[in-house]
Image: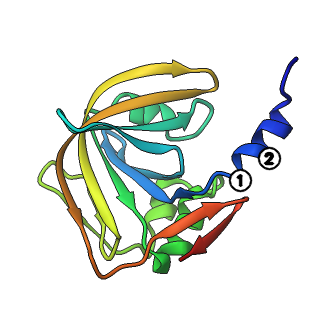
Amino acid sequence: MSVSPEIFKEVMGRFGSSVTIVTFKHDSGIHGLTVSAFCSVSLEPPRILVCIKKQGSSHEFLSQSERFVVNILAKEQQDLAWQFSNPELGSEDRFAGASYKTTEPGLPVFTDNLAHLECRMVNQFDGGDHTIFLGEVENCYFSEESTPLFYYNRGFHTL
């Protein structure tokens, strides 16, 4: 029995997840995209993974990058999540109006986020129509005063 992409998408939409924006630096500039396929992989060493659609505009640039940041968004950053998920916006337009700072290697980190993880690219794996990017966490931060933003059933929600 085969599962249709439509049914699979509906079922997976019932799985609530945090909302993140993956940011990184490439020779062409800074880039970022909204990602819900993110999870921890290992405590020792600390590793995470993100899954990025191969046909996405940022995929090729991320696959060539040595480092990236996973920004875990707070409830106040819903507009930012929409902005970075818009496929019609280029990198410059996605960052327009966004409040961020840059790390020592020049990676964008959004201010007022719930948390962020600065990662070194460890490996990339084929995941069908997505690539699984494995990163080792080199630095991280969290805020105890923020409320998370969640994605469930094709919409954003908070606690």
11 and 103: which is toward the camera? 11
Residue at 30%, 73% (x, y): give it: 111
Residue at 76%, 42% (x, y): give it: 9
- Per the image, the residue denoted by label 1 is 14
Residue at 49%, 77% (x, y): give it: 75
Query: How far across and down, in percent of the image, does residue 119 sit?
Result: 24, 42
Query: How far across and down, in percent of the image, does residue 150 sit?
Result: 55, 65
Label at residue 98: none
Residue 53: quarter of image: top right
The N terminus sits in image quarter: top right
Taking 106 as reference, is 136 above or below it?
above
- The coloring applied to the image is rainbow
The reply to whether residue 30 is in sight is no
Q: CA distance from mark 2 to mark 1?
A: 7 Å
* Secondary structure state at the residue bearing disc 2: helix
- Per the image, the residue denoted by label 2 is 10
